[in-house]
Image (spheres, rainbow, N blue to C red):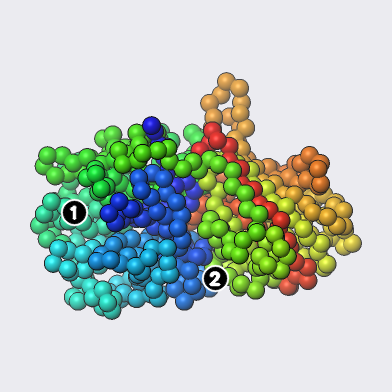
Amino acid sequence: MPYRNPVIPGFYPDPSVCRVDEDYYLATSSFEYFPGVPLFHSRDLVDWQPIGHCLTRSEQLPLERCRSSGGIYAPTLRYHEGAFYMVTTNVTGGGHFYVSTRDPAGPWSDPIWVNTGLRGIDPDLFWDEDGTCYFTATSSRGIVTCPLNIKTGEPLAGPRQVWNGTGGQHPEAPHLFRINGQYYLQLAEGGTERGHMVTIARAPTPYGPWEPCPHNPILSHRSTNRPIQSTGHADLVQAHDRSWWMVFLGTRPHGPYPTFHNLGRETHLVRVHWTEDGWPVVGDGGMADVVNALPDIADEMPMRWDRIVEDTFETDELPLHWNWLRNLNPAHYSLSERSGHLRLWGTGVTLNDLDSPTWVGRRQQHHEMTATACLHFEPEAEGEEAGLAALMNDRHHIEVAVTRRGEKRIALVRRTVGSLSTVVAEQDLPLEGPVTLFIAAETPRTEGVPPGWGEEPIYTLSIALGDRAPQDLATAEMRYLATEVAGGFTGVYLGLYATGHGQNCKAPADFEWFLYEPTVASV
């Protein structure tokens, strides 16, 4: 029975995994989004269920005016003597820190900060057999390691430079392991783009001397046309049946020429074997396939990510797949003021601002999908606006929205690409009544032409009133919400928002439901 990569689709990069008996836990980066560091649980390494976030309080996660793709970089998740530890870096809010808990579903502790005297990213924690905890990170001096007092976060000695990889640019993502009496240091090199790769070396001590693997890189899809690209930033885990596995990030570009990706860097899985002389062999000669045989520890079909997900806002809290931009103000959101609706109170902050707009979103996880929302909103003043947005960052987003223009209520479509922001379509609406908003992602098919060689992948933005058929208002090229154009390290979110464009809204925006509907063939 096969499983299909990615095992966690959408913007879930920099995966780190640990095992506790027959349970597996995985954490990923979150950057400017709140809450931070999403956490998943699995029993078979394939079927990953969200169980919470490591950083759920503003005291743990200060993101005020955090730049896009700032905030929380790569975490490492580890388990030691009954406690879970997650170490990471807030690159715009304090540097390296770790939190801990005995229940991974939370709550997690307040941060303990680590100051090695060197700025850096991608920290790692490793406990040796004698109980010593080693802190390893990427720094301005390369990859460094030092022993750490895990109770206080104080280094017990100065950081020492260790192995810096095989010569690829940006050596990063260090993970230190002890396997069969040897220390292994695994890195990512080549930058988190098409040249990304995983390399490894081993030594008799945590400080070296380091012997590089003779078949480095042990994982890379560089210079190939495989559907998974930018493979790297990996973590190793031994399953409870003694088999070995690697989780890693990768992208699924639209293509083939010119290729781009907008779902973000996703979490993938590949099997690892070991040579007789103690080196890991990843997948098929250092490459991972889209479709693979299920691990032996799996006893049933994994959860399908291609299912329809409907949010009816009838619970006390939003489901775990919803996030906010930076630190939210709870006063701007309510699930109780109007029963069965998510109420948003717009402020003067817009999606263009490096601030916390009234916005809540979930990841786009499929190349082809439709996001639909039912909105009740009668704006009282010029500039009041609420709608549905596809957002890559503050400079690259599109939205279909309801606003007021003079005495009229209208629907509009706006496209923002860099410094250019333009309303490209408007449609008069009745003064009252709900409006259904649609954003559909699709790749138009040309008969006889392989997907990606024909027409441009697009978003179509539409509205509907009552039982009427949806009316398309405009389209937007998908590439302008892609990393290759927008930059950064994140992926597209589909979000509900409200704004007064410089002033607080007098009218609330009430969303009755939200529907995420993937196209099965695009998973």
Q: Which mark is residue 327?
A: 2
Q: Position of residue 251 (x, y in %)?
A: 44, 44
Question: As shown in the figure, which amino acid type bears the numbered disc 2?
Answer: Asn
**What secondary structure is found at the residue carrying circle 2?**
loop
Q: Nearer the viewer, residue 398 or 511?
A: 511
Query: For mark 1, what is the residue?
Result: 184
Q: Position of residue 174 (x, y in %)?
A: 27, 58
Left or right of residue 367: residue 285: left
Q: Locate residue 367: give its quadrant.
A: top right
Q: Is residue 104 above or below residue 262?
A: below
Q: Nearer the viewer, residue 99 or 475?
A: 99
Q: Is residue 260 above or below residue 337?
A: above
Sequence order check, earlier mark of 1 and 2: 1
> Residue shown at 73%/61% (left/top)?
510
Residue 413 seen in the figure: no
Q: Locate residue 173: give its quadrant.
A: bottom left
What is the spatial separation of the Cα atoms under label 1 and label 2, in whole angstroms?
Answer: 38 Å
The N terminus sits in image quarter? top left
Q: Locate residue 46: give its quadrant.
A: top left
> Residue shown at 14%/44% (left/top)?
278
